[in-house]
Amino acid sequence: MTNSSILTLDKVTMRFGGITAVKDLSIDIPKGAIVGLIGPNGAGKTTVFNVITGFYKATEGHVLFDGRDITGVPPHLVCRAGISRTFQNIRLFSTETVLQNVMVGCHVRRSAKWWMAPIGLPSFTREEKAIRERSMELLASLRLDSVADEVSSSLPYGAQRRLEIARALATRPKFLLLDEPAAGMNPQETQELMGFIREIRDRFDVTILLIEHDMKVVMGVCEYIWVLDYGEKIAEGSPEVIQSDRRVIAAYLGEEFVHHAEN
Amino acid sequence: MNRKTRNLALTGIAIALLAFFIWWAQGNLDGYKIQVTNLVAVNAILALSLNLIYGFTGMFSLGHAGFMALGAYVNALLTLTQDQKTTMWILDPIAWPFSVMHAPFFLSVVCAGLVAAFVALLIAIPVLRLGGDYLGIATLGFAEIIRVVLTNLSSITNGALGIKGIPGHANLWWNYGWFLITLFFMIRLINSNFGSVLKAIRDDEIAAKNMGINTFFYKVVSFTVGAFFAGVGGALMGSLTTTIDPKMFSFALTFNVLMFTVAGGLGSITGSVIGSIVITVLLEWLRIVENPVTIGSFEIPGIPGMRMVLFSLALILIILFRREGIMGMKEITWDGIFDRSKRGGKSE
Amino acid sequence: MFVQHFFNALTLGSLYGLIAIGYTMVYGILRLINFAHGDMFMLGAYFVFFATTLWALPWSLAVVVAIIGTALCGVLVDRMAYRPLRDAPRISALISAIGVSFFIQNLSLVLFTGLPRAVMRPDWLVNVIKFGDIRILPLAIIVPIVTAALVASLLWVIYRTKPGLAMRAISKDIETTRLMGVPVDKVIAMTFAIGSALAAASGIMWALRYPQINPFMGLVPGNKAFIAAVFGGIGSIQGAVVGGMILGFIEIMVVAFFPGLSGYRDAFAFILLIVILLMKPTGLMGEKLEDKI
Ligand SMILES: Nc1ncnc2c1ncn2[C@@H]1O[C@H](COP(=O)(O)OP(=O)(O)O)[C@@H](O)[C@H]1O
Ligand SMILES: [Mg+2]
């Protein structure tokens, strides 16, 4: 697996003062996979995302991406290297339009400089147009093109989550992290989302790591799953393996259900 | 005729109308009215520059008076002749390169902006790591430091006595010319994807970083460019009043600029322009309360200082009851005026 | 010489510290830089001036009137200009605070005129006492003592009384405190009253030390005291006092030993501010708050 792995966490520990949010975590994610990270609230999942994307620097251990050590690299360079994410509490650019949100995502791959904008060089104008077109395509692929000119904060919740994904894709990531993408969605939207996630992986050739509480989503789309509890990895494996793991059931439901589940 | 050519034509017509107005005003308006008209243009430049920093990029900066002071002093030093400078500097004789340096007005104003921008760059690198109100107080601090330095460096600035008799080059043509340059620059920048990037930093800096934006770099750019235009505005203001001294560039001046910007609408270019017109005219109109008024045989004595009382009251009322100002974040655009079916779009 | 400088610094530091407490308390609770706080300092001095001249009250009674009057002004400012903005973006309240500050200054200019006024000073406070070569104003000893007493009683209120507990709770989490049934607005009003009263005390003592008062006298000491509060770690009362002291000592001692720098005196505070913000943004005694993502 190491050979074709895109992201490796090597004994990552993250401490905040007295709290150890993530402890000695090692993970290896194969290229092109859709994998999941689950665990009860407060288990440290979002912290793992923050460590990968450079918002926190791991107290110990290393993050390797595409063979490169990115431990402690600031977030904007992590993005440039090819990692993008969504946030558990949606963080859109709330005053900007849907289209502008996605276009901001395109910014990281552009070559023009800011001072070309007021001067209006032809190369600048051309690039600007290309970005607009690509953003519209992205919006179309997430069925948001009809609301392209709406202010992003006016969208319903499910659409905001999809817009965050579109915006993340605009940065041309090789690796996409989704933090509870189905949270707040109704069953129909969730069903659609599962389709989107697979479609995105195939169309954009990305590896996807997702945090999710909705077990239907996790078990439905993930090929491999890691389970965290109190910052520690308590299990890993295919959905079938995880579903029958007694420590996982104990972590989620409490010890008394383990026996129940085994019968 | 497609929309783009139409907008271009409309912009051309608007500029021609403005030029006609200036030509007419120079022949027909009295000196006081011309002065107010000039102030509108300079204040609009200042409001736009603060709006870039605060309204569009979300950096609460209270340092505008400092950058204006730098601009005004640079322009004064560059447009006064050597003779004028040597006779005026009383506290200390004027130091060498400053005594002889001289430039034509346009270049002088550009230099004023560049010096302000350069100092802003030096300030930005340490200070912009701070957020929110800490940034406000730190930039206020720098503006005060600039003022203290200007007061003390009397061999360059003539100290607390200030500089008098600055050539009054800044007539309507120059002021409105610079206003159009600033306006054009802002429209182009803000309507581009770089404008969206600045607004993204304002809306959510963490998400912006996650989008691969070097937020610190763009904050520095916005702050420095804003300071450039503040320096330009300061230079024009100094040339307009022909007298400057360090006291003039106190926090009260920043407060005025903040007022134009907030009243017009933070994050609205047209708002800044409208805010500058409304507030400048209001401020002049408020002079009534400071002058004695005679109604029939009654004379109501003027109340000195009342103008600023009403002015600050106005700011408080705006913040309490119409926080978004006149325009909010909306813009008036040709498209908005002429095809109401299509909302938004470019303003040009 | 040094002893005199020492007492000067102690006096100035106490005065800064007393103002700084008001900034730090309000910031700790509302995350608001109360720009109008420096003007409470000015109002305190003017209350004494008018109470002694216009109403011909004895000085000691005038002080009591001034402190109560200023406290009421502080509460009024909060009620009118800040409370309606509790749920608005924080910067709105800050702009409102700047507006209030200019409003108070200019209204004072209209009402009191810009003429510098001389405040009455009881003789026993300003008759120089001599210890051998050293000449000291009684004031220079009394100001630090009064300050220490005020700070001690404030700390008692904050750590030993129910309203103090409520204040500390609000500064940790205003919403939860509200849900627990604490009358949050009343406690905030009390915070403004206490802060303004201390600013008034500082203003009154300032007027004894530097007896010319004018409507803009609060501006510079106010800004400096805010810096002292940041320096000491905003939110911390002890920090505010320490910050005020340090600033007072720096100002007096630098000018005493490097007279050539006296023109830059008003810049020291800002330089100090910028240095501390860059080195330790939480100040000397502040707590670190990390953003959760
Ligand atoms: N910036 C931070 N400062 C202090 N503690 C934090 C910070 N971020 C996360 N934590 C703590 O780390 C633990 C894990 O949080 P999180 O990663 O958000 O959990 P999850 O996403 O699995 O629900 C929690 O106890 C949380 O309080
Ligand atoms: Mg989480």
Image: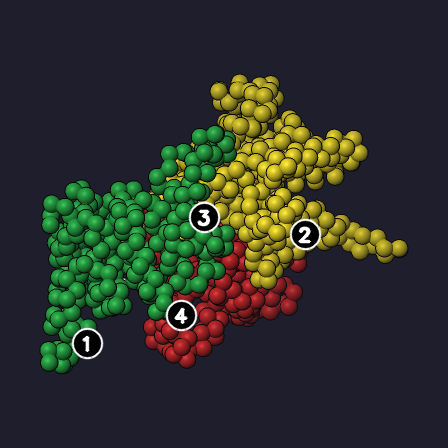
Chain colours: A green, B yellow, C red
Gap between marks 4 and 3, in whole Å?
35 Å
Residue type of the residue flagged with mark 1 = Leu
Residue assigned mark 4:
C174
How many numbered marks appear? 4
Estimate how packed mark 1 is, as few (under 14), some (14 to 19) or many (20 or more) residues with alpha carbons within 10 Å.
Answer: few
**How far across and how far down the image is residue C206, in percent?**
49, 56
Q: Along the line of sight, which residue is nearer the eye, B111 or B210?
A: B210
Label 2 resides on the chain identified as B
Q: Residue at x 41, y 51 (%)?
A: A140
Residue type of the residue flagged with mark 3 = Gln
Task: Name the element at disc 2.
Answer: helix
Residue type of the residue flagged with mark 2 = Arg
Depth check, mark 1 against mark 2: the one in front is 1
Residue assigned mark 3:
A100
Gap between marks 3 and 2, in whole Å?
43 Å
**Residues tagged by mark 3 and mark 2 found on one chain of the structure:** no
Gap between marks 1 and 2, in whole Å?
69 Å
Q: Are marks 4 and 3 in contact (CB under 8 Å)?
A: no
Q: Residue B307, which numbered label?
A: 2
Label 3 resides on the chain identified as A
